[in-house]
């Protein structure tokens, strides 16, 4: 089956009496000829990679090569343990984890593109935080990855998951929607509630531009991952509480596509407009790349490398930043 509309996934899941994650597993087995056990084993390895990145980026400060960013995952993790945060520490943990994974990505470490390397912090952020809550088993989190993969496929097939094509709404927005839907199913929500979580999460991401300073996937990318982890959790809770996306989720995805096409090229991964075009953004670019030729060439190329679409279905491809995201 083609994963092009959420309403089709929801209908099929209901007809078969399965979750969207289970539907994804069945379809993946049918289409690849692999057994369900093989697919689950592969997904479990990817979850391990995600968890390793979380642990690495919180245990120690991970610095990026540019020197512009780094250490925020570790910093947030230490802060939340003091128990004085406005946001509950259990929730803030997802932010710390998302920052950590994004820094590992920017530091050329090993991550899983979900759906891209630039937005790779959000899904591991919320899922590893769920694991650490003690409320869910690892196998349940692996199934949630399949839910996220199904959602990512729908967005990729009917809109875009590329910052160059659709702005950051297509990357961080898609990751937020994938994470929100995965959390709903993890918590035992219905396929319809998964759809509403996707719609709610995406609505809060519409219009988000892609404006990486110096063309590097660091500013504002890393911070956006941290903040959108909480958006994903909130969208999941809203859907589980019965809040509905008044605009049907498939229509929200269609709008994401339309807005992406309308976005000026300066705000689509070129490293020219938005935050990249501020005096500080330009100064940082000059500091990192030095001469004018490097400034002209390096930005878009690096951003493209780090935000390329994933190699495997649903944005669950393991990746090193800059080579296969
Ligand atoms: S490179 Fe662009 S699309 Fe990717 S995370 Fe950064 S701002 Fe978002």
Image (spheres, rainbow, N blue to C red):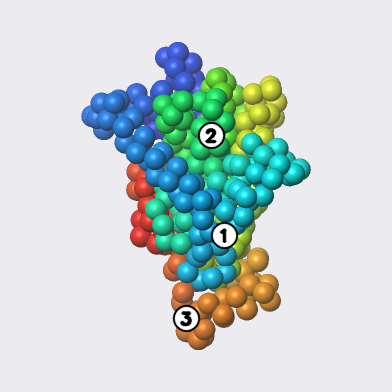
Circle nearer the viewer, 1 or 3 = 1
Q: Please give the residue where the numbered disc 2 appears in the rendered image.
A: 132
Precedes in sequence: disc 3 or disc 2: 2
Q: In percent of the image, x 57 and y 27: which residue is there? A: 184
Image coordinates for residue 217, horizontal then vertical, percent: 52, 62
Q: Residue at x 34, y 24 (%)?
A: 26
| Residue 256 visible in the current orientation | no
| Quarter placement of the C terminus | bottom left
Q: Which residue is mark 3?
A: 294
> Mark 1 — residue?
71
Q: Nearer the viewer, mark 3 or mark 2?
A: 2
Measuring from the top left, give residue 213's x and y in whole percent: 58, 68
Q: Residues within 10 Å of mark 3 (few under 14, many from 20)?
A: few
Tag of residue 136: none
Answer with mark 1 or mark 2, whichever residue precedes in sequence.
1
Q: Secondary structure at mark 1?
A: loop
- 160 to 281, vertically: above or below: above
């Amino acid at each position: 089956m083609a994963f092009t509309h959420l309403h089709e996934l929801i209908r099929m899941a209901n007809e078969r009496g399965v979750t969207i994650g289970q539907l994804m597993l069945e379809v993946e087995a049918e289409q690849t000829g692999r057994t369900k056990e093989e697919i689950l084993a592969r997904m479990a390895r990817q979850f391990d990679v995600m968890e390793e990145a979380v642990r690495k980026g919180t245990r120690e400060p991970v610095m990026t090569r540019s020197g512009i960013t780094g250490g925020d995952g570790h910093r947030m993790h230490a802060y939340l343990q003091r128990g004085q945060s406005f946001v509950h520490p259990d929730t803030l943990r997802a932010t710390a984890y998302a920052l950590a994974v994004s820094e590992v990505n920017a530091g050329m470490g090993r991550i899983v593109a979900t759906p891209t390397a630039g937005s790779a912090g959000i899904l591991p952020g919320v899922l590893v935080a769920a694991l650490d809550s003690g409320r869910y088993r690892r196998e349940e989190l692996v199934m949630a990855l399949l839910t996220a993969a199904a959602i990512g496929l729908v967005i990729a097939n009917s809109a875009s998951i590329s910052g160059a094509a659709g702005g950051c709404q297509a990357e961080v927005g898609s990751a937020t929607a994938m994470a929100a839907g995965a959390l709903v199913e993890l918590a035992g929500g219905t396929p319809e509630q998964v759809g509403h979580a996707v719609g709610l999460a995406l609505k809060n991401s519409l219009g988000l531009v892609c404006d990486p300073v110096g063309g590097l996937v660091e500013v504002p990318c890393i911070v956006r991952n941290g903040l959108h982890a909480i958006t994903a959790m909130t969208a999941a809770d809203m859907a589980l509480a019965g809040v509905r996306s008044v605009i049907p989720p498939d229509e929200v995805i269609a709008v994401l596509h339309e807005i992406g096409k309308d976005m000026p090229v300066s705000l689509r991964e070129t490293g020219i407009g938005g935050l990249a075009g501020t005096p500080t953004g330009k100064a940082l670019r000059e500091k990192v790349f030095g001469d004018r030729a490097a400034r002209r060439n390096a930005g878009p190329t690096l951003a493209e490398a780090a935000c390329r679409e994933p190699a495997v279905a649903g944005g669950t491809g393991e990746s090193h930043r800059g080579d296969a995201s």
